[in-house]
Amino acid sequence: MSNQSESNRTSKVMSMSDAIAKYVFSGATVAIEGFTHAIPTAAGHEIIRQGFKDLTLVRQTADIVVDQMLAGGCISTLVSSFVGNSSAGSLGEIRRRIEDSDPVKLNFVEYSHYGMVCRYLAGAQKLPFYPLKSFFGSDLPKINPEIRKVTSPYPNSDGGFDEIYVVPAINPDVTIVHAQRADQWGNIQMWGLTGLQAEAVFAAKNAIVTVEEIVSDEVVRSDPNRTIIPAHAVSAVVEVPFGAHPSFTQGYYDRDNAFYREWTGISGEKESIQNWLKTWVYGTKNHAEYVALMSEETKQRLEVGEAMSLPINYGSRL
Amino acid sequence: MSNQSESNRTSKVMSMSDAIAKYVFSGATVAIEGFTHAIPTAAGHEIIRQGFKDLTLVRQTADIVVDQMLAGGCISTLVSSFVGNSSAGSLGEIRRRIEDSDPVKLNFVEYSHYGMVCRYLAGAQKLPFYPLKSFFGSDLPKINPEIRKVTSPYPNSDGGFDEIYVVPAINPDVTIVHAQRADQWGNIQMWGLTGLQAEAVFAAKNAIVTVEEIVSDEVVRSDPNRTIIPAHAVSAVVEVPFGAHPSFTQGYYDRDNAFYREWTGISGEKESIQNWLKTWVYGTKNHAEYVALMSEETKQRLEVGEAMSLPINYGSRL
Amino acid sequence: METQTNFSIDELLTVTAARALAGKNVVFAGIGLPTLAVSLAQETTSPNIEVIYESGVCGAHPSALPATIADSVLITGSEAVLNLAALFGYVLQGERIDVGFLGAAQIDKFGNLNSSVIGDWHNPKKRLPGSGGAHEVLANARETFVIMRRHTKRSFVTECDFITSASPDRAIAEGARSNAKGVTRVFTQFGVLARENVGEELILTGIHAGVDVAEVIAETGWDLKVSPNLEILPVPTQAELELLRNEIDPNGMYLRP
Amino acid sequence: METQTNFSIDELLTVTAARALAGKNVVFAGIGLPTLAVSLAQETTSPNIEVIYESGVCGAHPSALPATIADSVLITGSEAVLNLAALFGYVLQGERIDVGFLGAAQIDKFGNLNSSVIGDWHNPKKRLPGSGGAHEVLANARETFVIMRRHTKRSFVTECDFITSASPDRAIAEGARSNAKGVTRVFTQFGVLARENVGEELILTGIHAGVDVAEVIAETGWDLKVSPNLEILPVPTQAELELLRNEIDPNGMYLRP
């Protein structure tokens, strides 16, 4: 009975440059999420191109894109629970900023993985804090005063009242994530590792979602449970194929493990990392040009096979 | 590289009577969940058949199955946030127990819907409590002393420290839910309305999941994101077609709205509800016999159409 | 009313509520008239409305009118289905809802609602279903619209027997942080009661053609104030009635004559 | 050791760890040797093991050895993929894990782990990746197995430079409620350090054939105690080695010579 007149409905599709220009600003708190899978690297590069400064970057697993944004001079504070080039070596720029304050000390706010998850959970639910069983006995609360305690109002088995650690809500000015696909209204569909993308988006004042492809309403609505973020939580949808390289997008292209290994060398010297930025970021107008720079050999190496899901029936009464 | 030897792996498939006998006991705290969709009614009927008493029943939307279990003499305490026969009339037995203490007063613990969700969230996460923004100004905390407050350790915008309400964890002795399908190991796949089934199962010491069909590993593993409850959280899987009647199972059969309307009359008098139990529960050995009693007209009326999801690609590197 | 010849009270209520949704984007609908009002608004003033149901459905496009907020027809072809932790935690408490629709057995002048009991909670004359999600809708939606088909002293009361869902007025007085405005519109067979902000009373701001203000006051349990700018609510247009009758509820499932 | 001719240290460590998984059901694995140990256990002593990765994968059945804990090959054909709120909240903090595998830069005699910094946290000599999920694994898994391929004074320390992941001993002392036993096994090139319960020290309970106990003590930063029942660990069987070499890691991705 509902024929919502799509003709008048407002599309959220934007170009990458417009979306970043509209929702990112110098001094903003920006969350860039994606747990190894579907890292919105292309969006990070556009932030570098547009030259935003003094960002508080919130990212659970701070990896290559963070090293690149640091080298691009975008970040003054980093909130994270893992600063490493997963099983592939190290991140030169982050280590220079933390170990040598070169060129200047990075303000690093350290959490555990679940501590980061809980900050987004509180943010998404507009709670002042979120409780978790972590941190007892650890040195993390000593170096991170944001990690605090509350007392449970319910007696424990001994009749006492236990304390429990809590972390504060994070509500980024903008959260940026990447997914396989979306419709033009902003319904985001994702599969494989979905990480904490939904929580990071719901926690944010605005959300930019980059996708491998924008698909028709029929595709999205054939499988509404596949939508991990509903349209109303999304500010802009950007179609950017290969937008997660060098990370992977399940079913589209694989992780560029060779590049992760190369990064240890590239980031080892300030000059080499700046040269890399010159070629791949400053030297490209947009991600299409970045992809054009990728060798055919690389693209072939990242190709994935076919492993299709079996259809299910959403049918209702006749 | 992994050829986990399925031959030696232990199946969790059980008969309904064995599963209920093994995990339910008189005096137990039993959660039966399903938000209008996929209510495990067949399991509720087996609890009545086996004559368990003095249960603390936890159910967010207490509807027909609760009225039936009350009439079966199974329940002494009900924890719920909605006691109604959704848009179809009323629940005679619950009203007699609350309004007339007939035959005896029901101990009713009232929450709001999100209050119930949060009790399961705390239970699933083994937290002592879960914070939510509900309950301020409401009379619910006055009649439910389990609803308490904590003070946030983070200053608000005025520099003060806000109070917030919390609810206590619930950890049922057993949680029972219904889903479309599972594999023999206990990986539960569900679509359409998924409610709070995953949280209720993770919160429980044991979990029984009834399903429309047990499917092959290949079906489940073709779409791992469709698994809303992983095997390790499930104690028993029971195959019971039509196991949610008179509620519905998306893609399998529709809601029996006519029966919901009839229930107002059936439950209106103690005699008529007991007669109904005699015929449909005590008079049947198991749910197969219950289904056999359903008229062909009813089964035809509940048939659903076909609305298949479009396949997605889970492919990885070649 | 003389207009009765042209359209029913249900149609009048639905059209009036639909017009009040102009410019709204995220609407939490109940079953029945609210669903019809949202559909009408989507096809007229508010094409951007994303309709959300308590069951977890976002962007429903049902092929038939739903019988419950969890009807299978709401799921098929919808834009998203969320679990309840996300629907209540991220969408409702996350303050994503512009307008929530609610009903109630009792409402007072500040928009406190009772859906739990008639009489004393411990020994009720009548046990009602309870909060469901109503408490969270009123507490978290930017504003709440209430549809009451029968405006009488029994439901428009000076004091609710039990406050299931509290107005932000009461919540804030107890120390809550709230961005909700509570009940801003009540649609009844007589017209519209309204308030714009927390702390204000619901007053009579509009009546349907032919309604006697004295009767409305007489049927209200509290000393109902009448707006100095009381308006006679415009009647449904032929276009609106045709959409309702031919497209949205062709079988008269909810629009009773 | 003379046995070197028959199998490598990596094979020895993997087989020893796999045998320790006998009877376990839910195992949280890291990449590399832990993944190999779980696969070997699944195919020998523990067919019921459901392997879980921090990325959210439950019941992985990869077609090739994963390069990371989030490798696409872990997702394809797996039994379930959970988001991180569920993986960390319901599975880890929900106390569903029997055994968690971890590594660390430093470990002390009670199984406190450092993966954050070498030196002072504020001005570190070396910045390490940090906790990741290690803190939650040690805090919530029923017990934790640690694999350290290089047992030296630099990693087996009297006091960690920074305690990223605390033993339950320290957590309980600060007021935590914990059912975790902390680090119960440490597998190294020398043998096995073990403890059964909270409050106990990790002591040397087993050595590989040909290992000199004095060398182990010399390479341990704390006053390592030796079990009165010190055992010489049984060497890998031909069947175990064939599974590792022909089936589990045929290309020697992790099993270095």
Image (tube, coloured by chain):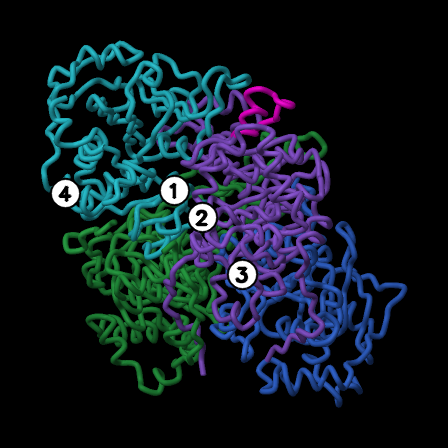
Chain colours: A purple, B green, C blue, D cyan
Disc 2: which residue: A255
Disc 2 with disc 1 on a shared chain:
no
Give me the chain letter of mark 1.
Answer: D
Q: Mark on residue D242?
A: 4
**Are dots 3 and 4 in contact, CB under 8 Å?**
no
Q: Is residue A107 above or below residue C178?
A: above
Horizontally, is B2 left or right of C235 in the view?
Answer: left
Of labels 3 and 2, the one closer to you: 2
Q: Is residue C77 visible?
A: yes
Q: Between disc 1 and disc 4, whose residue precedes?
A: 1
Q: Between disc 3 and disc 2, whose residue precedes?
A: 3
Give me the chain letter of mark 4.
Answer: D
Disc 1: which residue: D68
Residue at image position (47%, 63%) is A225
Kind of residue indicated by mark 3: Arg
Q: Secondary structure at mark 1?
A: loop
Distance Cα–Cα, label 1 vs label 4: 24 Å
The stretch in magenta equals: A92-110
Q: Mark on residue C177?
A: none
Distance Cα–Cα, label 4 vs label 2: 30 Å
